[in-house]
Image (cartoon, rainbow, N blue to C red):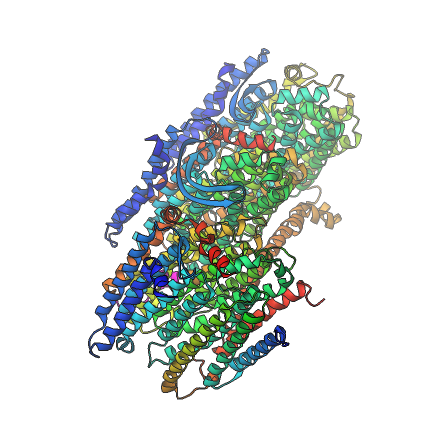
Amino acid sequence: MSSVPLTAYLMLALILFCIGLFGALTKRNAVIVLISIELMLNAVNINLVAFAKYSINPGLTGQIFSLFTITVAAAEAAVGLAILIALYRNRQTVNVDEMDTMKR
Amino acid sequence: MDLDTLLSFKWSVMAPEFIILGVATLLSVIDLFMKKEASRKPLAWLAGAGVLGALAAIFMQLDTEVTSILYDTYRLDSFSKAFKILLLLGTLLVLVLASNYKKEDIDENRGEFYYLLLSALLGAMMMASSADLITLFVGLELLSLASYIMAGLERRNKRSNESAFKYVVSGGIATAITLFGMSYVFGLTGETNLFLIAQNMQDPELLKHGFLLMFAFLITFAGLTFKIAAAPLHMWAPDVYEGAPVPVTAFLSVVSKTAGFVILLRFIIITFIAAPGIDSESLLLEVQPYVMILAATTMIIGNVTALRQRNIKRMFAYSSIAQAGYILVPFVSNSSLLFELIWFYLLAYLFMNIGAFTIIQVLTAQEKSNDISIFRGLFKRSPWLAVPMTFFLLSLAGIPITAGFVGKFGIFMGALGLEPAHYWLAAVMMATTLFSYVYYFNVIAVMFFRDGEGAKVSVPSGMAAVLAFCAVSTIILGVMPDLALDFFYGNFDINEFFMNIEAVDTHTHDH
Amino acid sequence: MLQMSWLIPLFPLLSFILLLLFRKSKSESTAWIGVLLTGISLVMSVGVFLAVWQGEGIKTEGTWFQIGERAITMGFEVNPLNALMLVIVSLVSFLVHLYSKGYMHGDERFPVFFAYLGLFSFAMLGLVVSPNLLQLYMFWELVGLGSFLLIGFYYFKPEAKAAAKKAFVMTRIGDVGLFIGMVLLFWQVGSFEYDEIFASVKNGDISSGMLTLTALCIFVGAVGKSGQLPLHTWLPDAMEGPTPVSALIHAATMVAAGVYLVAAMYPLFQASEAALTVVAVVGGLTAIFAASIGLMQKDIKRVLAYSTVSQLGYMMLALGASGYVAGIFHLTTHAFFKALLFLAAGSVIHAVHTQNIEEMGGLWKKLRITGPLFLIGALAISGVPLLSGFFSKDEILASTYADGKYGLFWLAVIAAFMTAFYMFRLFFLVFTGEARGNEKGVHESPSVMTFPMIVLGVLAVVAGYLNTTWFGTFLSDYLAQGPVELPHGDHHGPAWIPLVATLAAALGIGLAYLIYQKGTLSRDWITRSFPSLAEVIYNKWYIDEGYDQTVVKGTRGLSKLGVLFDRYVVDGLVTAVTNGVQGLSKIGSRLQNGQVQSYGTAAIFGIVILLLIVALTGGYFS
Amino acid sequence: MNAWLLSILIFSPLLGVLVLMFVPSNDEKSIKWLGVLGTLFPLGIALVVLSAFKMGGEGLQLTEKFSWISYEVFQSKGQVSYPIFYEVGVNGLSMVLILLTAVVSVLAAIASFSIKQNWKSYFILFFLLEMGMLGVFAAQNLFLFFIFFEITLIPMFFLIGRWGYLEKEKAAYSFLIYNGVGSAILLIVFVALFMKTGTMNFEQLAYTFSLPQAELNQLFITKGFKMGMLIALLVAFAVKLPVFPLHSWMVRVHVQAPPAIVMIHSGILLKIGAYGVIVFGAGMFPDQFKSLAFVIGLFGVINLLYGAFLALTQTDVKRVLAYSSVSHMGIVLIGLAAGNEFGMTGAVFQVVSHGLISALLFFLVGALYERSGSSELSAFGGVAKRMPILAGVFLAGGLASLGLPGMSGFISEFMAFLGLFEKMPVLAAVGTLGLILTAVYVLRAVLAITFGAEKELHEARDLTSSERVPAFVLLAAILFIGIYPAWLSDMLRPTLDAILLGLGG
C-alpha cells in the first residue's frame, strides 16, 4: 500500500474541481470556460481512480468509469467548441459576458 | 469477453434501442448522400417509422420477464418499458413538430435534426434501461450532447447559438457536479452496478460515513436536477427554451425532462433505498427535508417568476420548472405509489405540454413573435386552436377533467400518503399552483377576452393531428384516468424495479 | 260562528289580491270590493263578539311545520280580549274603507290604496286572532308592512318616503325586542302558545329575572309599535300618509297593537312587578311628554298624532298600574274618538287643502257636519263627563291611584289638562274665528265620508257606557272570562278622582277658550315667558335631532369606517400579498440576468447552502 | 331508468351544449331560446328525480356507484387499494339544492336574454356551469365533489371575464384566485382524508370518523388531525360562503359579473360553501364542529353585522346587494353554530331562501341596469311611477330580504336565531342588531330607487313579459316557502336529523 492516503487524492480532486468551477464561473473567455469544465471532469476522474484503488470497497469499475468520463468529456468539449464557433460566426465574440440577449 | 459470451446475451431485449440506433444511422447516411437542395421532409417519415417500430417492439416486450444483459448493465424491466413508452411517444410527437417547423435555417439541417433527435432518444432510452452508473452516465451524455446541438440548430440565429452555448456550459457544469457526486457513491461502495451499490450500502462499515454519503447524495441529486430543470440547476431553462427552436424546446421540456426523472428514479431509489443516514437511520428518510426544500424552491421559483413573463416560450420554461417541482414532491416521501404517480404525471405532462408547444409553434411561426400578444383574440380567429390550448393550460394548471388534475391529485396522494404526511409541502404546492393560475389564465384571458386582429391561423395537417391527439388524450386521461392506470397496473409490475437477478451471481463470481 | 272566525282576516286579504289584480282599473267602484269584503269581516266579527259575550271561546291549531320533534303551530283563537279587538278593528277598517272612497277620489292609484288597506286589515285581524306569540309576531310585522306601504302611498314625496322608512325601521327596533323576548320565552317554556306560557308562568317554571327580562323585551316591541317613549318619533311623521290611513292605522288599530300585546301577555307582566312598573312609568312619561309637544304643533294631523301618542301612554300607564280593564277600555273608546277626530280632520283637509291650522279658521259654518263631529271627538278625548273618554280616563286615573303610583297619577292629570287644552286650541283655531286662509270652494264632504264619521261620533259618545260604575261594568265582566286574572278589589278609587279629571279638562278647555277664542290672553304669553322651554317643546324636545346626531350619525360613521376598513385593511392585505408575490417575481427575473455563469454560481450557491445545512444540523462541525 | 336518473340529470345540460354546437353563432334568437330550453330540460329531469325521491326517506336515494379510478398501493400491511368511485346520490338536503339549481338556472337563462354578444359560447359555458352545480350537490364522494366544484370555477371565470362590466377581468381573476385558495385547501384535505381512511365516500368517512378513538389511532387519525381537517375545511368553505374577511372577491364579482351570472353565483354557488360546511363539517366531524360552534357563531354574527354595516352607505345598488349577501350568509353560519334542529334547518332555509331572493334582486338590478345603464342609487328615483311592476317586485324582494314574515327570509332568520338563542343567547342578541340594520339598508336602497321624485331613465319600460317570468316565479317561490315551509322542512328533516344525531342534538 502506498503511503499516500486516500484523503490526499480526494483533496486534490476537490481542489481541482473547485479551480475548474471557479474558472467556469468567472472567466470571460468562453474557451477557458469550456476548458475549466474539462478540469472539473478530470477532478472526477482522479476521484474515481483513487477510489478504485483505495476505497473501503475497492473495485476496478472505477477506472473503467473514468475512461468513459474522459471520452465523454472530449465529446462534450468538441460539441461545446463547435457551438462556440457557430456563435462566434454570428457575434464575433467569445466573451461569455456578452451572451445575454435572453434574460429576465 | 469472447464472442460466445456476446452471443449468449438475449439481444432481443434491446430491440427498441437497436431500431432507433439503426434508423438514426440510416438517417445520417441518407442525409449525407442526399442532394443539398432536396427536401428532407420524407426523412421524417422514416424517423417516425423508426420510433413507431421501437414502440411496437416495446409493446411486444410487455410480457417479457425482467431480463438483464451485458453483466446487468442493461436491464429490461417494467420500469424501463413504462418510461420508454413515454420517451418514444414524446419523441414521436416532437418529430411531427420538427418536420413542420418552418425556418430557412432549419431546412438545410432538417436531416440532422431528425437523427439528433433519435440519438437523444437513444440516450434517454439507455438511461431507462441502465442498471449501471457507467451506462447511465453515457446515456445521459448522449442525450445531453444531442440536445446541445439541437438547441443550436438554427445556426444563423444568434439566440439559438446563445441558447446552445448556455446549455453546453450549464450542462457541462451539471455533468461535472453529478459525476463528482457519483464518484463518491462509487468510492463508498466500490461498485458501479446499481444493485451492487445498494447491496454494499448495507455494509456496516458505511455507517461511519453517513455524512459523506449524505453529501454524495445531495451533490448527485443536485447535479441531476439539471435535466429536469429543477432548483438549483434550473436557471438555464428559460434562456435555452427561449432561444432553441420550438420543437427542441418541446423536446427539452418533455422528453429530456422525462429522462431526467428516469435517471433520478433509477439512481436514487435503487442505490439509496437501503443507505444509512447520519444517525444510522434510513438516508432517504433523512434527506426528506432537503428534497422538500428543493421541490418547494423549484415550485416557487418557477411559478413566481413565470408571472412576469411576456414571452410565451419563456413562460413555458418557467412553467416547466414549476412542473418539475411538482413531480419532485413524491420523491420526498417516496411512497410506494411513486412510480405510477410520476409515470402518470409525465404522461399527462407530455400531452399537455407538447400540445401547447404545437400551438405555440404554429402561432409564433405565423406571427413572427414570441410575445404573449400573439394569442390575442385567438378564440375569435381560430377557435379550434383556442379551445385545445385552453384545455392544455387548464391541465397544466391542474383543473379537473383534465389529465393534469389527476396527475396533481396523484402527487398529493404521494405527498400525504405516508406518515409523516407532508402538509407543508402540499400547501406550498397548492399555493404556487394558485400563482400559476394567474399566468396560465392570463393566456386564456388574452385568447378569449382581448380582441385581436390578425388572420385566421392555418394549421398544417400533421400539427393538427398532434393537436387533436394531445387534446383528446388530455381530456380522456382526465375523465378516465383508469385507462392509463389500468394499463400501467396490467402490464407493469413495479416490483421488478427492485428485482436483482444477475447481480447476486456476478457478485459471488467476483469474489 | 266561532269556527268560522279564521275567515275574518281572509276577506281583506282577498280584497288585497283582487284589488292588486284590478290595479290598473280607472273605475273607482273598485273601492266597493274593499268595502264589501271588510263589511263581511265586520259582520262576522260582530257575530263572533256576540258569541263570546255569551261566554264561548275557541282555539284551533294545526301544525305549520315541524322541526325535529317540535311542531310550530298556526291557528286561531277567540277570547274576550281579541273578540273585542276584532270588532274594533273591522269596524274602523270598514268605516275607513267607506270614508276613503270619498277621500281618495281622483287619485290615480285609487285601487292600490284600497288594496293596501285590505292588506293592512288582513294583517291586523290576523294579529288579533293569533293564538301564539310566533303567529302574532308574523302578523305584527305584516301590520308594519301595511303601515309602511300606506305611509309611503304618496311615494313620490320625499317626506313620505322618509316617513315610511322611519316608521318601518323604528318599529323594527321594537320588533327585535319582541323577537328576543319571544325566543327567550320559547326556550323557557318550549312553546310559543299563550296558554303554555301562562301555565309556566303560573307554575313558576321561569325564574323571576327571566320573567322580567322577557316581559321587558316584549314590552320593547309594544313600545315600538305604540309609539311610546323613546321610539315614538315615527308616529307623527307617519302623518305623511293619507288621512284615512292615519285614522285607521295610526290612531285606532295598529298603534293600539302594542297595548293589545301587553294586554294579551298580561299574565306574564303580572308576574313581574318590575316589568309592570316599567310599563307604567314609560306610559305615564309618554302621556305627558307627547301631550306637551302637542301643545305647540301647527299641523292638524300632527297635533292629533301627538295626542295619539299621549293617549297610548295613558293606556300603557293603565296596564302598568294593574288597570287591565281600564287600559282596554281606553283602547276601545280611544279607537272611536280618535278615528273620528282623524276622519274629521281629513274632512277638513279635504275641504281646505292644507294641514296648517294657522291657515284655517271659521270653518264651523262651512262644515256643518264635520264641525260638530269634531267637537264631539274633542270633548270625548278631553274627558268631558258623559262622553266615552271621560269614563275610560277616569278609570285609568283611578287604577293608577289605587295602585299607589301617585306621582304618575298627577302626571296623568296634568296630561289630561294639556290634552283638553291642545284639543280645544285645535278646535278653536280651525272652526271658530276668522278664516285665515284660502276658503274658496270649501264645502262639506260627501256623505260617503260623513256617514262613517257620524257612526264614530255616536260610538264616541256611547262607548263609555260599556264600563261604568253607574250602569254596570259590562266590560270588566266580559273580560273576566278571559285568561287574565283580573286584579281583585275596588278599582274605583276615591270619588274625588272624577272631579279632578273633570276639573283638569275644564281648565284646559277654558284656557284654550281664553286664548284662542276670546283672545283674553295673548296667544304667545307662554312663549314669551318661557322662551327656551317653548323652543324646546316646539322642536319636539329635539328628540329627532338627538337621534340624528347620535344613533344615525354613529351608525353611518361606523358604516363609513367599515368601508374604509374593507378597502384598506381587508383589500389591503390582499394587495400586500399580491405585491409580495410580484416583488418575488421581480427578484426572480432580476436574478435571471442572462449570464450563464451567474446561473452556475447560483446553482453552486444552492448546493453549498444545502451542504451547509446538512453540516450544521448534522452536527458535523460541533 | 331510475338507476341512471341522477347521472342523466347531472349531465343533462350537456345536451344543450351539443345542440348549440350545431347552431350558427350569429343566430341570436335560436341560441337564446335554445339556452332556455337547455335549462328547462334539466329542470324537467330534476322534477322527475323529485318524483322518484321518497319524501322523508332516510339516507341516500337514487344512488349510483361505479368503479372509476383505482390506485394500488403496497404497504407493509400488504396490498391496499385506494379506489375512487363515481358515486352519486341524493338526500333531502341535496335534493333541495338540486331543485334550487335547476330552477334558478332556468330563470337565469331567461335573464340572459340581455346578453349582447357571443351568445353561443355564453350558453355553452352556462350549461357547463349548470352541470358543475348539479354535480356538486349530487356527488357522494370527495373526489367527485371536488371535480364538480372546480368545474363550476372555470365557466364562471369566463362568464365573468368575458361578459361582465368594466372591471370584469379583475373580478374574474379575483374570483379565480380566491376560489382557488378554497379549492386548494379542499384538495389537500380531501387527499389527506383519502390517504388516511382509504375511502372518499361521505357516509363511509363519516362512519370512520365516528369510530372510537382507539380504532382511529390505528389509522393514525388523532383528535388533532380531525380538528385540523375541520378547520381547513371551514376555511376553504369560508372562502366560498364567503366569510369575513374573505369576502372581497364576492363583492367584486357581484358588481362586475353579468346579472344572470350573479343570479347563479349568489343564488347557488355561494351555497356550495354552506352545503360543504354542513356535509363535511357538521356531518363528518361533529364533535370538533361542536367545540368550534362558538367561533362559527361569532363569525356568523360578524358577517351579519359587517355586511349590514357596509351595505348601509354603499352608493351602488349592486354593492348594497353584495354586502347584503355577506350579511345573509352570516345567518347561515349562525344557524350552523347553533347546532340544534332549529339552527340547522334555519341555515338550510336561509341557503334556499337567499338563493331565491338574491336571484330575484339581482335579476331586477340587471333589468334596471339595462334600462338606465347604471346601477348607482343616485341614478334612480321614482321608478314606481313608470315601472310599477318592477318597483313592486323589487320592493317585495327587498322585504323578503329583510325577513318579512310570509316570505322565505323570515323563516330562515327566525329559525337560525331561535336556534342560536338556545346555545349562545348573548351572541344571538348582539346578532339581532343585524335585523334592524338589514331593514335600514334594504329600505334605503329599495326606496331610493322606487320612491321619491322621478328621474329620467334611458328607457322607462316596465318589465317585459319575458322578464316577468323569472320575477314572478322567484317571488312565488319565496312566498311559497314563506307560507308553507313544511314542504321544505319535511324534505330536509331526515337528512338533518342524521347530522344532528352526530352532533348530539
In this view, which residue lies farthest toward the bottom?
A92
Locate residue C301 relative to residue B477 in the image: left or right.
right
- Position of the N terminus of chain B, as image quadrant, is bottom left
In the depicted structure, whether residue B265 falls above or below residue C350: below
Residue C412 can be seen, yes or no: yes
**Residue B279 quadrant:** bottom right
Q: Across the whole image, how many numbered discs are drawn on residues? A: 0
Residue drawn at (38%, 66%), measured in percent from left and top?
B123
Q: Is residue C161 visible?
A: no
Left or right: residue C579 compared with residue D478: right
Quadrant of the rendered image containing residue B84:
bottom left
Instruction: Tell me which corner region of the image, top left, top right, bottom left or bottom right, holds residue B427.
Output: bottom right
Query: Which range of residues does the magenta coloring cover?
Result: B442-456
Residue B409 picture location, percent across and down: 46, 50
| Residue in the foreground of this view, choosing between D296 and B27 | B27
Q: Position of residue B127 (x, y in %)?
A: 41, 63
Q: Position of residue B455 (x, y in %)?
A: 26, 68
